[in-house]
Amino acid sequence: MEIIITSPSLNPHENVSGISSVTKFIIENNAAHHYVHFELGRKDHEKGGWHRFVALARRYREWKKLLKAYPLALIHYNFPLSMASILRDPWFISYALKQGRKVVVHVHGGFFLSAQHIPFLPWMILRRVFHQDIPFIVLSDKEKDLIESKFGARRVFVLPNVVDLKDAEEYAQEQTDDVSHEKLRIGYLGRIEPNKGMTELLDACCQLKNRGCEFTLVLAGKEQTDGEYLPRFERELGSHFEYAGLVFGEAKYHFLRSLDVFILPSYFEGLPMSLLECMSYGVTPIVTPVGSIPEVVKDGVNGIFIRQHDVSSIVEVMIRLNKDRTLLRSIGKEARRTIFSGFGLGRYIENLNWIYTKA
């Protein structure tokens, strides 16, 4: 079957996106179908304002042409619940449905999934989208409950993200537990921007430095706004900071193998691929319990929760793990066990193809 699948650019040099990672994973592993990728989403260096409206109008015309070129293709539409997507994506979805096309909408978290209060306009738009009699894919049972209760969705299927475990399995066989004399290596992988808790992370690391804690913070990813954070991290942390840049392929494997702790003090999430990837390498996750994260991470078992917007909770956890390397490794081992037992490729593609049949 031919399937048109939407996402931002699949080139990591152009865009750092969890949705792109999921899309690329599906295309590369679902050999049963032929995928046609339709790029939809702003590139990291793309201009905003009027330029963005012109680009969207052009993409909408190209969307119509693509659907005409593939009249029998099913549409796999990736839909994050951010304001930009809520204002943009329903137009594309609606056009496909008006053409009688079969559509599966894949929801990827976002601020408006779990927000306590949703303004009237985005709420009305989401109600209209989720009232459609089409399959919706979500990342967890929690997201399923939220979409059904908030927006009245009826055909909702749970399909958690998964990761490729080949290199992680090889690393597990090589790994040793003796890290008692090493500096604590704290890593972050993803977009470097305020909603990921970068301000709190910087403040926490400054406090750790001032208290004499031996650590290195390693950031990997792309700044949402050039110069917003990286110069501050470099200036205020000095030798305690490294910037790994964009990592993929062998560079990503090396990065993941180097970490003791994965830090994600995010304000909202779906189910981050970076979290699953780090856990698969036995890296201890320190995360805020937002989105679908609590359905994977169990506090004190395979990870540790920190409070949103709370610098002190980050500091307390890091000092604790730096002193207690036995605890660090035991949580890391349980994190790896969690991913290997339930988040490998396994039945993911089989379940995805089953959902396609429901369209």
Image (cartoon, rainbow, N blue to C red):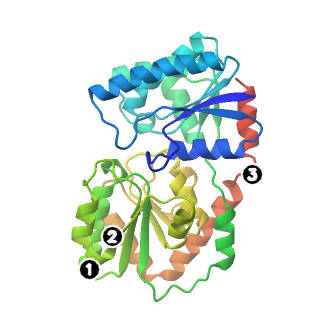
Mark 3 vs mark 2: give the one in front.
3
Q: Position of residue 201 (x, y in %)?
A: 32, 62
Viewer-closest of 159 and 245: 245
Q: Mark 1 or mark 3, which has the lower sequence index? A: 1
Mark 1 vs mark 3: give the one in front.
3
Question: Local crowd at mark 3 within 10 Å, few (<14), some, or many (≥20)?
Answer: some
Question: Callout 1, which amino acid?
Answer: Arg
Secondary structure of the residue carrying numbered label 2: helix
Residue at mark 1:
211
Q: CA distance from mark 3 to mark 2?
A: 37 Å
Secondary structure of the residue carrying numbered label 1: loop
Rendered residue at 22%/69% (across/down): 235
Q: Mark 3 or mark 2, which has the lower sequence index? A: 2
Question: Local crowd at mark 1 within 10 Å, few (<14), some, or many (≥20)?
Answer: few
**Disc 3 + disc 2, Cβ < 8 Å:** no
Rendered residue at 55%/17% (across/down): 65
Q: Mark 1 or mark 2, which has the lower sequence index? A: 1
Q: CA distance from mark 1 to mark 2?
A: 10 Å
Question: Local crowd at mark 2 within 10 Å, few (<14), some, or many (≥20)?
Answer: many
Viewer-closest of 331 and 29: 29
From this view, report whether residue 118 is shown above or below residue 183: above
Rendered residue at 61%/63% (across/down): 280
From this view, report whether residue 183 is shown above or below residue 58: below
Residue 20 seen in the figure? yes
Question: Callout 2, which amino acid?
Answer: Val
Residue at mark 2:
315
**Disc 1 + disc 2, Cβ < 8 Å:** yes
Q: Is residue 350 left or right of residue 98?
A: right
Residue 133 seen in the figure? no
Rendered residue at 59%/67% (across/down): 281
**Label for residue 271?**
none
Residue at mark 3:
346
